[in-house]
Amino acid sequence: MKKISLLAITLLVCSALSYGWGFFGHKVVHQLAIYNLPKQLQGFYYKHQNYMIAKSIRPDERRNDDPTEAPRHFIDIDVFGEEAINTMPEAWEAAAEQYSVDTLLKYGIVPWHVVVMQERLTNAFKQQNVDSILYYSADLGHYIADAHVPLHTTVNYDGQLTEQKGMHSLWESKLPEMFAQTYKLNAKQAEYLPNAEKQIWKVVRNTYSLIPNTLEYEREVSKNFTDETKYDRVERYGKMRQYYSDDFAKAYQQRLGSMVEQQMSAAAQEVANFWYTAWVDGGKPDMDKLMYQQLTKAEKKQLKQEKKAFKRGELFEKDLVIAAKKADKE
């Protein structure tokens, strides 16, 4: 197997250590979500755009120090049976009574934690607490985005049970990092969710339905590769590790078609929907009055340009994706 450059090693290691869309993907989702908000909220979130994007990865960073954090990012729904995706109780109390709290924590609680975070954000809006609004918005968006990643809904989370180890970082990190500039990332203005709990379960069910193709397409593409061309090898801490090669990623991306871009767009849409719903349920506070400083003329002009580029699918072309800018500098 071929060895790779120091830069490639750095990118691969960063992807392998990240979770749920990778750092790059989460930052892009949060930026796009802001463009989907109505005017009553958009100015506030855009004023704090740098914070929202930077803190979109905070839940992943907490995993290193907080042992309770990991289960909040996934749900291995198939471990409960083939029909569990349709029969699992949506309400936490009912699910805990049927399976026990320890069991649910072991196999992931992302849909239930989204509901918890939604309630906290709603209360933050009721209290008109700017710091809490920003804090819970960033965290809530992260968990919603995670719920859009197929491998976050199965016990075979890395393809380890089907001899496809490494699928996790390939799908959620490597592909977006390599091909996001070609994606048609778009959505529509945020909509109110009458039942946030039902909506996040709808998201999980749709995401879970993508698992068969996610795995099967990898097997199909693998037929055209040898181990030598399918993987790159990286030495870390004295051990050789393998990661999917760029050539394989290109072939896999082509076979997947629009799956990743659709999930990324859907994630941004749902993040905006949940933020907007929390604001409505929180009494629709006047966000202009909560801003420490109003948008300047230059910021309003910049927001208008970004929204226009977003609608035309030109954010990357016009170098307006903040996560991409920072990646270039690094």
Image (cartoon, rainbow, N blue to C red):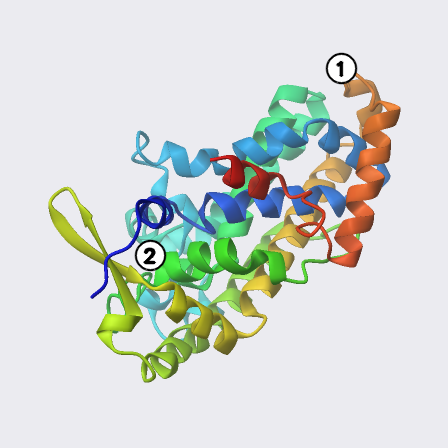
169 with respect to 257 (left or right): left
Using the numbered discs, state the Cα–Cα distance from disc 2 to disc 1 in whole angstroms. Answer: 47 Å
Image-quadrant location for residue 233: bottom left
Upstream in the sequence, badge 2 or badge 1?
Answer: 2
Q: What residue appears at the point 38 percent right and 70 percent down from the top-left corner?
A: 248
From the top left corner, tell me how far across and down residue 78 is, in percent.
36, 68
**Where 107 falls versus 13 (above or below)?**
below
Determine the residue positioned at 38% across, 45% down: 18
| Residue 193 placement (x, y as % from top left) | 71, 52
What residue does disc 2 label?
Answer: 99
Residue 81 versus residue 6 in the image, above or below:
below
Element at label 1? loop
- For badge 2, the amino acid type reads Tyr
- Circle 1 is placed at which residue position? 292
Indicate the quadrant where residue 126 lies.
top right
| 290 or 321, nearer to the observer | 321
The reply to whether discs 2 and 1 touch (Cβ–Cβ < 8 Å) is no
* 97 vs 138, nearest the viewer: 138
Q: Amino acid at mark 1?
A: Tyr
What residue is at 68 percent from the left and 27 percent from the top? 48
Q: Position of residue 276 (x, y in %)?
A: 73, 42
18 displayed left or right of 311: left
Is residue 90 in view from this perspective? no
Residue 171 falls left or right of residue 104: right
Disc 2, SS: helix
Please identify, in this view, whether the residue under mark 2 or under mark 1 is nearer the observer. Answer: 1
With respect to residue 97, does 228 lie above or below? below
Q: Position of residue 118 (x, y in %)?
A: 60, 40
Front-lying residue, 128 or 225:
225
Residue lying furthest right in this view? 297
